[in-house]
Each structure stands twice: as structure tokens, then as C-alpha cells.
Image (cartoon, rainbow, N blue to C red):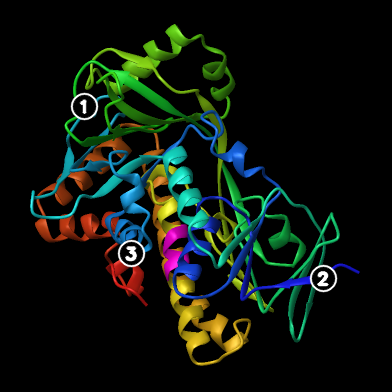
Amino acid sequence: MSETLRSDVLISGGGLVGQALALALAHHGLSVRIVDPADPVATIAPGFDGRASAIASATWQMFEVLGIAGRLAGHGCPIRAIKVGDGAPDSGRGGELDFVTADSDPPLGTMVENRQLRLALAAALADAPLARLSMPATVVSRAIDAHGVTLTLADGTRLAAPLLVVAEGRRSPTRDATGFSIANWSYHHHAMIGAVAHEKPHGKVAHEIFYPSGPFALLPLVDDEQGRHRSAFVWTVSERDGPGFAKLGERGFVAELQKRAGGVLGAMELVAPRMTYPLGFHHSASIVADRIALVGDAAHGIHPIAGQGLNLGLRDVAALTEVLVEGARLGLDLGDAALLARYQRWRGLDNMMVSLATDGLTRLFGIPGRTAAAIRRTGLGAVQHMPMLKRFFMDEARGEAGDLPRLLAGTEI
């Protein structure tokens, strides 16, 4: 029988959230092992993930503590303003509402290509002696008892720890197999994502236009090596129209893209592969069970309308790290139910509130008709003229609202 390899925490899932958690725990002295069926070399290949993510300012402070921010130098574009408009017929287009940061304030977020995030995390984990990767590896059995969790891999290796953290994404097999109750529904929309080079500089401004068919966003990226201005796009269309747009040739797709953008960035050309995926909502009633904790999309999947999906998962990382590190210092069992209950209380409400807020926005801006458009314009105009309310929304975008874990405040635990 093969030897059992023990660690303080096992993480099932080696995506951005799983790797960030492994790094945060190892940075604070806990041994951790990631298990994932994906080949780590494949996950950092240029064509693996063409998306880009808006990293909230509070999350960036955690990156600075963990040594990731330095590895992303030159790859992040700060978002200094967000312009929001209603693209419904007769509503006009452009800046009905804008959020602009002062030069002395932190940005609303920093846009980074997911591939650069993966490269930075991989390099940081390679320098973390307490972090180990079992990738690619397939789990063939899982045992949970009073003493801990044991995973048996296809090659016979056994991994054991007091706690298993599930970071497997939206379609988490471990979450589903262990009986978590999930509320979920489809938005009957598809998101098309990619990146474009464009004629006009973006000025570090993000644009979001709400059409009845779904939101359309342009998010600023750093210029490429040839000096071309670039932005990521997230374009939401109804599920009946998604296949048709996906079949468009590059020329026709770019023409439609420029039409949605309203010429704000001038002529465009695609500079990254297009990706399309269906949009849905899911939320786990609980994020902990017997010696198991959920993080990231395994716990909550939201609409990309506000760009908060990854940040929500990284807030899970910061909170769970603080709970486990403090528990370890007190000599507690890291799978103890009372310890996990603290994580549930800390993250449960925030996850629910953000999930419901994004769902509500999606539904509000999807209502067709002139009356609905007029109500939205009135609401946008009201927020535009209320500085305190705008500040609240800006703090939310930065991830600075609520009971922040120390990592999100930029300090060690």
C-alpha cells in the first residue's frame, strides 16, 4: 500500500482561486496540496483562457502581500473611470452615469489578462516550499471521517488533511457528490468575450452599455508590444442569437462589435480568440460541511454584469485564510465545525448580497420598453447627482466595503 502524504489543507481545483488560496495559506505557514486533473503546462498556454479580469483594489492589496503584484508589473491597466449608459431605443448612449477616481485615490480596479494571472501564480507557487501541486491527477475515491479527509488518486497515491477546500468552479463534482444544496437558474443569455485593438486610446476608462438583449462592456488593457491600444470586451446576447454571432466571420463580428460600442474607441480588430459560454446563476445555501469548505465559483456563480465574479472568490480566499491561520495558531483542528462556521458567517451574507444585486441589475436592465428605459435613465441620473451614493458604489467596486479580512486591507495575518 502506498504511503499517505499529509498536509494541513487539501484543495481540489487548481484554477485562479484555488492557486491563490494555496499561496495565501503557504505564505502564512500552512502546508497545502492542490489536486486537479488539468495539466499545469496547458493552463498557462496562450490559447487556454483568453479572458481578462478586473481585480478590485482591495484584492490587489492582497496580491501585494502575497508577492503576486510584483510579478504582474507592466501587465495591469488601472481603471480610472467607468462610464455607464442605457442602450435601449430612444435612451441615448454614453455617460448617463460615470464613476471617476481622483489621482490620489486607488483605481476602481486593475484589468489583467487571465493568462498573466496564471503565470504569476504559477511562479509564486514554485517559490513556496509549503505548497505542492498534484497536477494532472484524478481523484478516484474520497473518505471523510472524524480524523480528516483522505483522497486516493488514480495512481494509488493517498493524500490526507484535516480539511478539504473545494475550488472546482461552477460544475464542481465534489460539491455535488457531497450533498450541498444549490439554487440555480439560466439567464438564457450567452456571453461572448475576447480582446480588440482599437484606433483611439481608452484613457483607462471602462464602458458599460446596457442593451435589452444584455450588457456590453469594454474594459481597458495595457497596450501591446507594438503599441496598439487594447481593450477586453464582454458582450451578452440572448441564447437564440448566440450561435448566429458565433458563426460570423471576423469581419462581420467586428462590424457588429463596433456598432455596439457606438464608435467610442474607433476602428477595431480582434487580437484574441473569441470565446462563448452560457450564463447562469447558482448559489450554495451553505459553503461548509463536514471537513469541507467551498470557495469561488463552486460556492457562487454570478452574472458578469459588474465584473465581480473572480473578486468574490478571492474574498473567500482572504477570509478562509484568516480563519484557518488563526485557528492553527490556537492549535485547533482545521476541519473543526466551529472554525468553519466562522467562515460561513463571514462570507455567507456578502456572497448572497452580491449575488442578488447582480441578478437584480441583470433583470432590471433587461426589461424592454420605453417606460422601463425611462425609469432606468431616471435612476442613473439620480445616482449621478448623489456624491455619497456614488462613493458607496465606488467602494463596492474597489472591494473596500464591509468587514474586510486583513489580507484585503494589505496586511499580514
Callout 2–callout 3 Cβ contact below 8 Å: no
Query: Mark 2 or mark 3, which is nearer to you?
Result: 2
**Residue 317 inside the magenta-drawn segment:** yes
SS state under label 2: loop
Quarter of the image with the C terminus is bottom left
Q: Which residue is mark 2?
A: 3
Q: Amino acid at mark 1?
A: Gly
Identify the secondary structure beneath mark 1. Answer: loop
First in sequence: mark 3 or mark 1?
A: 3
Q: Earlier in the sequence, mark 2 or mark 1?
A: 2
Q: Extreme right residue here?
A: 1
User: Looking at numbered disc 2 in the image, what kind of residue is underneath it?
Assistant: Glu
The earlier-in-sequence mark between 2 and 3 is 2
- The residue type indicated by label 3 comes to Val
What residue would you read off at disc 1?
92
Select label 3 or label 1 by which is in front: 3
Are there few (<14), some (14-19), or many (20+) residues within 10 Å of tag 1?
few
Residue at (52% x, 85% y) in the render: 328
Q: Is residue 205 magenta?
A: no
Vertically, is 113 above or below 323?
Answer: above
- Circle 2 residues within 10 Å: few <14, some 14–19, many ≥20: few
Region rendered in magenta:
313-318
- Which residue lies under the disc numbered 3? 65
Q: Residue at x 23, y 42 (%)?
A: 79
Camera-nearest residue between 136 and 62: 136
Q: Main secondary structure of the magenta part?
A: helix
Q: Secondary structure at mark 3?
A: helix
Image point (76%, 86%), residue name: 146
Instruction: Decide if residue 217 is on the left or right side of residue 351.
Output: left
Q: Nearer the viewer, mark 2 or mark 1?
A: 2
